[in-house]
Image: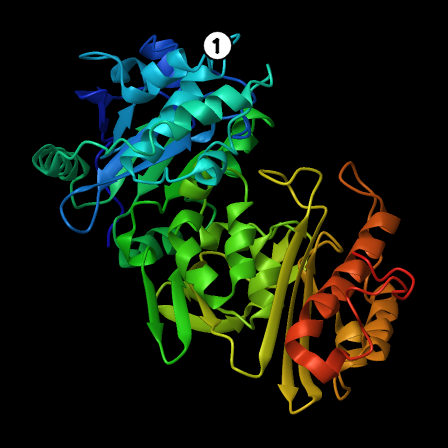
Amino acid sequence: MAEPQSPSDPIRFVLNGEDRSVAGLKPTTTLLDYLRQSERLTGTKEGCAEGDCGACTVIVSEPDEKGGLRRRTVNACIQFLPAMNGRAVETVEHLGQGGPAPIQTAMVEKHASQCGFCTPGFVMQLHAGWLNGAIADRQSVKDLIAGNLCRCTGYGPIVEAGLSLAQLPPPKNAAGDAALARRLTAMAGTDVFSYRVGEDRWFAPRHVDDLADLYAAHPEALLVAGATDVGLWVTKQHRDLPLIIDISHVRDLQVIEEAAGRIYFGAGVTHRAATATLASIHPDLGEMLRRFAGAQIRNAGTIGGNIANGSPIGDLAPCLIALDAHLYLRRGEEMRRLPLADFFIEYGRQDRAPGEFVVAIEVLRLASNQRFFANKIAKRSDSDISAVMAAFRLSFDGETISEARLAFGGMAGIPKRAAMAEAALVGRKFDMAAVEAAVAALAEDFTPLTDMRASAAYRLKTAQNLLRRFALREAGSLGPRLAAIDPEADDLPAGAAA
């Protein structure tokens, strides 16, 4: 595929029902800045400018595979404007057209707005949850708004306002959705979207072969999917990003397939889209993703992006390493398969050549002789960065541990297996002596750092206690393997409580 020759395509999208065609703005202009400064749609607020507070929440829609619409909320503060090409954006101002939306009425009736700054973000998040059928009970409302912060601590009335929508069927407009989907498809086109302003360029391929050609031709380019990390490079670090390849429109990377107990997640699958499948592997994975950032971040961030950025505190990598996941990487026409544990080399460095990108992640389902555990420790329960993330998988041959995979995040410069602790378990029965041997070995595996999230001593003790927690949890299901442990006993071994 030849590089697009047009000087620049305009950014074409639908904003609050009206067509827009934008040119001349830097590719790294955020959607929030465009809405507030160019459109004067100031209902969308800037709070944190890093995707944490939800004050900038908007609804983005795009065509789905069935000719309808897929609606999701995103943080406008870290979404780049060119990524909206071929999509529809809805802000809080649009909800009032033709009368207040049910959530707006509920917010008034429940006295759910105090200073009002965060209110538009809560309204958009709850409105989208209602449209998507995600409001069922109190917990579902809390999960929806975990990425929205109220500085006035008025969560009670907000939850009540959201809960009032549970018994109200969302409107159905299949014909209208189909019409908008066709309109957006025509806007997006089928070729590579090429947007240029001065020396700054933004490419958005629609097929994986075009992505491979573009990246091979421009290995210096920055790949962006959900921009949940890269967005902060602009809003917080003020970096200049002259060449970006947006992979969020590549449908080939957004598939989930399963065959013979192996699940393949395209690198562009969002955390939201992956949640149900990962939870079907083990409930701990579903619970981890429930607490993974806020809903707006899960709607945008991708599985491949979480892996490829190589963060030492990414929640997903330890879980996938424990499951013996493999990566498929592509460079031009060449493809290779690599154990995920071998992908991370050192802080900021992965086994990825220039022009090579993650295509898919292969994950194995658990066998009947395997036990799995994943747990995230952070200062807040919801929407927080981990201090320690732990994921374990043990395989048994009868009563004997035949394989141990213990993976941690936050304990080193990369997501890493605990080789010494694994060796302390293999070949032994899963009893307290084996667990304590592994606990002791963790001090040989890791020398964690002290930072704003946790001290080195806290991290090590937490990692050790998470291994004990796994043992205590499995005591009931594994019977004689942990006969030495009675979870109800008053005289547990010192330090056994997590």
Answer yes or no: is residue 386 visible. Answer: yes
Taking depth in this image into account, of 470 and 79 the one nearest to the observer is: 470
User: Foreground residue, 99 or 149?
Assistant: 99
What scheme was used to colour the molecule?
Answer: rainbow
Local packing at callout 1 (Cα closer than 10 Å; few below 14, some 14-19, many 20+) is: few
> Which quadrant is home to the N terminus?
bottom left
Q: Residue drawn 37% across and 37% down?
A: 135
Q: Identity of the amino acid at label 1?
A: Gly
Image point 19% across, 31% down: which residue?
171
State which quadrant residue 440 falls in.
Answer: bottom right
Kindly state the secondary structure of the residue where label 1 is placed. loop
Taking the view exactly as shown, the residue that stands out farthest to the bottom is 398
- Residue 298, located in which quarter of the rendered image? top left
Residue sitting nearer the eye, 99 or 423? 99
Q: Could you tell whether 310 is left or right of 148 in the image?
A: right
Q: Is residue 29 above or below residue 195?
A: above
Q: 103 or 1: which is nearer to us?
A: 103
The location of residue 476, given as percent across then percent down, is 67, 73
* Image quarter of the C terminus: bottom right
In the displayed structure image, the side of residue 259 where residue 293 appears, left or right: right
Residue that mark 1 sits on: 116
Query: What residue appears at the point 23 percent right and 20 percent down from the top-left corner?
Result: 16
Q: Residue at x 24, y 38 (%)?
A: 62
Is residue 27 something that shows in the picture? no
Corner quadrant of residue 398:
bottom right
Vertical comparison of 326 with 354: above or below? below
Residue 442, position as x, y percentages in the image = 83, 66
**Residue 310 placed where, x, y %?**
60, 53
Q: How many marks?
A: 1
Q: Position of residue 21 (x, y in %)?
A: 21, 22
